[in-house]
Image (cartoon, helix red, strand yellow):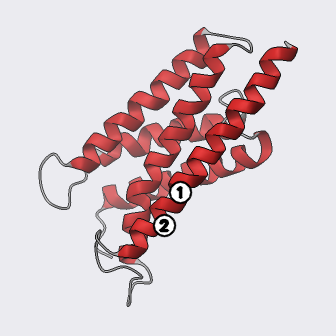
C-alpha cells in the first residue's frame, strides 16, 4: 500500500471520524456536537485534516491540502456556532450544514484512496479519472444534498416548537 507512519495514523483517525459521523447520522439525523459521537467526529476530523496537510503523494501544496483547509474551516465554524449560539435557532441550520459538508468533503479523498488501493492486488479503480470514482462521488453528493434537505426540514420543525 505504501503508506508512511503519518499516512497510517491519518487513515486510522479518518476512519474513526467517518464511523462516528455515520453513527451520529443514524442516531440523531445529524452530527450532533453535544453527543459523544459528534465530539469524536469533531476531534478526529480535526486531527485527520491537520495530518493531511503533512501528506503529499505528488510533492508540495495540492488540492488535497485545500480540501483539508476547507474541512478545518467548516468544522471550526460549526463548533463556534454550537458553542456560542445555544438553543434551537437559525444557527443550527448552518451548524448542521457545515458539519455535513465537512463529512462530504472528507469522503472525496477517502473514496479516491480506497478505490485506487483496495483490494491490494487488484484495486477497483486505476486512478482518479476512473468512472467508478466519479459515480461513487456522485452518489455521495446526492446523499449529501438529500441529507441536508432532511436536516433543514427537521431543524425547522424543532425551531417552530421551541
Instruction: Decide: few, some or many residues near mark 2? Use Cα within 10 Å; few <14, some 14-19, many ≥20.
Output: some
Front residue (pair 89, 73): 89
Labelled pair 1, 2 in contact (Cβ < 8 Å): yes
| Above or below, 64 relative to 78 | below
Judged from this view, the residue extending furthest toward the left is: 60
Residue 136: assigned label: 2
Front residue (pair 131, 85): 131
Quarter of the view holding residue 68: top left
Q: Is residue 89 visible?
A: yes
Which residue is labeled 1 in the image? 140
The C terminus, quarter of image: top right
Q: From the top left corner, tell me how far across and down residue 155 is, in percent.
A: 74, 26
* Residue that appears at 32% across and 48% down: 52
Residue 26: assigned label: none
| Above or below, 18 relative to 78 | below
Measure the alpha-carbon separation of dots 1 and 2. Answer: 6 Å
Mark 2: secondary structure? helix
Front residue (pair 108, 32): 108
* Residue that appears at 39% across and 83% down: 123
| Above or below, 107 relative to 72 | below
Q: From the top left corner, tell me how far across and down residue 87 is, in percent.
A: 73, 12
Q: Is residue 66 left or right of residue 147?
A: left
Judged from this view, the residue extending furthest toward the bottom is: 121
Q: Is residue 30 visible?
A: no
Instruction: Decide: few, some or many residues near mark 1? Use Cα within 10 Å; few <14, some 14-19, many ≥20.
Output: some
Mark 1: secondary structure? helix
Amino acid at each position: 500500500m505504501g503508506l508512511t507512519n503519518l499516512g497510517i495514523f491519518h487513515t486510522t483517525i479518518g476512519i474513526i471520524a467517518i464511523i462516528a459521523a455515520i453513527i451520529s447520522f443514524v442516531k440523531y439525523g445529524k452530527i450532533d456536537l453535544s453527543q459523544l459521537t459528534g465530539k469524536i467526529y469533531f476531534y478526529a476530523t480535526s486531527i485527520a485534516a491537520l495530518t493531511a496537510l503533512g501528506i503529499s503523494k505528488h510533492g508540495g501544496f495540492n488540492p488535497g491540502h485545500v480540501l483539508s483547509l476547507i474541512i478545518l474551516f467548516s468544522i471550526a465554524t460549526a463548533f463556534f456556532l454550537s458553542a456560542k449560539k445555544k438553543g434551537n435557532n437559525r444557527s443550527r441550520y448552518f451548524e448542521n450544514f457545515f458539519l455535513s459538508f465537512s463529512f462530504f468533503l472528507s469522503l472525496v479523498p477517502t473514496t479516491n484512496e480506497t478505490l485506487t488501493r483496495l483490494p491490494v492486488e487488484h484495486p477497483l479503480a486505476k486512478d482518479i479519472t476512473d468512472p467508478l470514482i466519479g459515480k461513487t462521488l456522485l452518489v455521495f453528493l446526492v446523499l449529501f444534498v438529500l441529507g441536508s434537505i432532511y436536516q433543514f426540514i427537521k431543524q425547522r420543525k424543532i425551531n417552530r416548537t421551541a
